[in-house]
Amino acid sequence: VAEGICQVLAYMWLETEVVPSTSTASSSSSSSSKKGPQSHVENKLGEFFKYTFFSNSSPIYGGGFRAANAAVNKYGLRRTLDHIRLTGLFPV
């Protein structure tokens, strides 16, 4: 649970800070990153890291990420964190 939610938070950071959204052409310039637009290499590296979260075969890191990500997608980050704090488990 602990590693899974940490992986989700890392993934969320990666999505917002390293890999800009591809929905608009100006998204990299409007990124919340403090260092400005990302280079092509940084974007490719970020996409690779995002892929590794989903493809990791480790039960602790990969499985934990997938379980935590499913909970966050279903209940939201705040409710998921509150549930973990109260029970030590992901909400189902």
Image: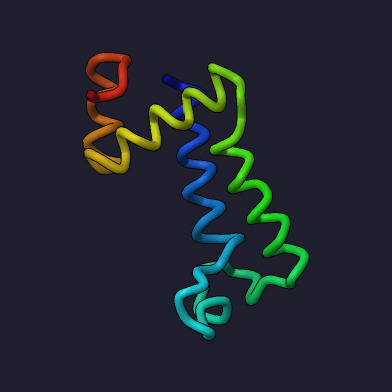
Q: Nearer the viewer, residue 55 or 43?
A: 55
Q: Where is 64 relative to 26, above or below? A: above
Q: Nearer the viewer, residue 4 or 81?
A: 4
Q: Residue 5, how many percent across, how many down?
A: 43, 30
Q: Residue 73, how many percent across, how many down?
A: 30, 43
Q: Nearer the viewer, residue 57 or 29?
A: 57
Q: Which image quadrant: the N terminus?
A: top left
Q: In the orientation shown, which residue stands out farthest toward the right?
A: 41
Q: Residue 56, how many percent across, how many down?
A: 61, 30
The residue sitting at 46% across, 38% down in the picture is 8
Q: Which image quadrant: the C terminus?
A: top left
Find residue 70 and report its image quarter.
top left
Q: How many marks?
A: 0
The residue sitting at 55% across, 27% down in the picture is 62
- Horizontal side, residue 42 vs residue 79: left or right: right
The residue sitting at 65% across, 46% down in the picture is 49
Find residue 35 and report its image quarter.
bottom right
Q: Residue 13, how many percent across, how many down?
A: 51, 51
- Horizontal side, residue 86 vs residue 63: left or right: left
Find residue 76 and report its image quarter.
top left
Q: Where is 43 relative to 83, above or below? A: below
